[in-house]
Amino acid sequence: MLIETFIRKQLRLKAHRVTKVESSEDSLIIFLDRMGQRLLRCGVCRKRCLHIHSVRKEREWQDLSMRQSRLILRYGPRRVECPRCGVRVEEVPWAEPWARVTRALSNAVARWARELSWQGTARQYGLNWKTVAGIVKRAVGYGLRNRKRLPVHVIGIDDVSRRKGQVYLTVVYDLERRVLLWVGEDRTEEGVKKFFTEEMGRRRCSTLQVVCMDMWAAYVNLVREHAPQAQILFDRFHIVKHLQEAVDEVRRSEMRRLMGREKVTFKSTRWLLLKNPWNLTGEQKERLSTLVRWNTPIVRAYYLKESCQLFWEYRQPKRAQDYLRKWMSSAMRSRLEPFKKFVRMLRSHVDGILPWTKLRLSNGAVEGMNNKIKSISHRSFGFRSAQYFIAAIYHCCARLPLPVEC
Ligand SMILES: [Zn+2]
């Protein structure tokens, strides 16, 4: 088989043919031309056109490499007279109208960009970062237009921070299928509203049964407004995170006080605690008792945290409720301000916490995906705009279909 025929078959050309192949040191240049009088398609509406208006100057497309050689297609696109659209550039079967790479190459790039960083993908194919970014953005656009929109029953809303917590994105997962549904800038009511109005629409909102999320007023308001039938469930992982923050706050303020009041170094206090009390001198005993006194807030915080965690084991709503109520009143009596704050938060959200005993759902199911998003943001220093970051998240987590090669 001649190489011309081979390439024609590979590119599945019908109205075009390969006229010659030139090889240089690192690339093969494939010259294409129109095949006889076969009809070309309009680049806008894809209709076959009878008349050719003119020939545009030759341009190049990069294709998948063959061994070490880059493959370059070279062709002068025709301008056709379309009865519907007027004079337009023809549609070439190997690439999108604006593209400088073939569809085969852009699909390969899109596939790799799910695994590698965009920089790494670019290096792999001898492209620049911007080309890869453009390919991913278009693949995501195609995927979003062409994905199946199945009914959704259980969703999880979460936020992702960018630039050390200065910029937030909101992500929404389908917790049943464990797939990303939506990413949007911001975590304000205005920003996340688009998920309910644009992505879901009224009809799909009406099938929502459970919405799992953090205790965040903007999200609560949106669910109440757009999916009032859905049960709000405050996410276990978020509640635990707030609890741990309370412990940490107690520890930090105690450490500050400890440092300020007396110059007791950490090393010597540790030794005081380890030594048998009957071996301590009078002065040491005194130091130990003040230390224990100073540390009681930390000890109390630790026990409160541990006992709070028992709530998650309850399966009977009544018992769970009793336990939580008892725990909250003991925390209120703890004289630890961070815990009081935490209890006040729980009290006003209790309707969305108790359903845990029955539902046993949490955003932890998609923790892998949250980690993936974190690793995307770490490996991609090029995301100066949120738009690129959003495209990368969709690309890696939403299981979108890729454009079909013809
Ligand atoms: Zn047309």
Image (cartoon, rainbow, N blue to C red):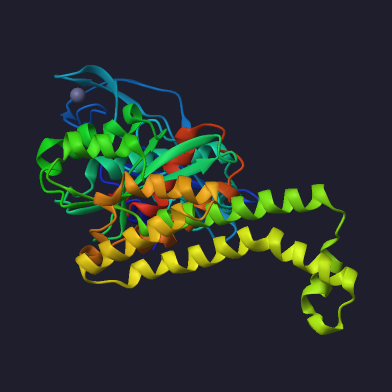
- Examine the rendering and report whether any part of residue 100 can be seen: no
Residue at x 12% of width, y 45% of height: 229
- Of residues 282 and 379, which is closer to you in this image? 282
Q: Extreme top residue here?
A: 86
Q: Quadrant of the N terminus?
A: bottom left
Residue at x 42% of width, y 60% of height: 367
Residue at x 25% of width, y 66% of height: 357
- Of residues 383 and 116, which is closer to you in this image? 383
**Residue 110, image x, y percentages:** 43, 50
Residue at x 71% of width, y 65% of height: 292
**Residue 125, image x, y percentages:** 56, 51
Q: How many marks?
A: 0
Q: Is residue 368 above or below residue 108?
A: below
Q: Horizontally, is 162 left or right of 279 in the view? A: left
**Residue 132, image x, y percentages:** 50, 42
Q: Is residue 71 above or below residue 270?
A: above
- Of residues 223 and 168, which is closer to you in this image? 223
- Of residues 232 and 134, which is closer to you in this image? 232
Q: Quadrant of residue 162?
A: top right
Q: Extreme front residue here?
A: 282
Q: Horizontally, is 3 left or right of 316 in the view? A: right
**Residue 202, image x, y percentages:** 12, 36
Q: Quadrant of ligand 1?
A: top left
- Examine the rendering and report whether any part of residue 42 can be seen: yes
